[in-house]
Amino acid sequence: MKTASMPSLRVDPELRHDAESVLREGESLSNFMEQALRSSIQSRRAQKEFISRGLTSRDEAKRAGEYFAAEDVLNEMEEMLSQEKARTRK
């Protein structure tokens, strides 16, 4: 597979210094930037999917007319967590 270049990135010297200051042993600034870009893409995809699922859920609730109070859902989740913690302690 051929590689492609990303556009040149102009930043102020302080940002470059900050980036260079966190590089790991043997890591280049280019490697760091590529990983940051990949991480940001993954994060944005996850955020987009999360929002999509939320909108789908909202639409389904409107269609079905079935809603749940946030407090009830949180209480149920707390109970599930407590049960799981108790189970793993045994």
Image: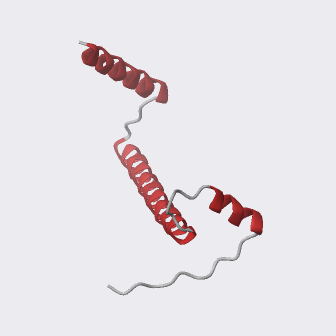
Would residue 24 appear left or right of 1 to someone viewing this image?
A: right
* Residue 45 found in image quarter: bottom left
Q: Quadrant of residue 75?
A: top left
As drawn, 11 above or below 87: below
Residue closer to the observer: 77 or 18: 18
Give left or right: position of 36 versus 13.
left
Q: Look at 46% across and 29% down and name the residue there.
A: 69
Image-based side of 85 in relation to 52, left or right: left
What residue appears at the point 28 percent right and 14 percent down from the top-left corner?
89
Query: Which image quadrant: the C terminus?
Result: top left
* Spot occupied by residue 44 in the image (x, y as percentages of width and height): 49, 60
Residue at 36 percent of width and 87 percent of height: 2
For residue 53, side relative to residue 11 (left or right)? left
> Residue farthest to the bottom?
2
Find the residue positioned furthest to the front.
25
68, 40: nearer the viewer: 40
| Residue 32 position within the rendered picture, expressed as x and y whole percent measured from the top left | 53, 64
56, 4: nearer the viewer: 4
Residue 37 to residue 8: above or below: above
- Where residue 15 appears, as percent x and y from the top left, is 71, 63
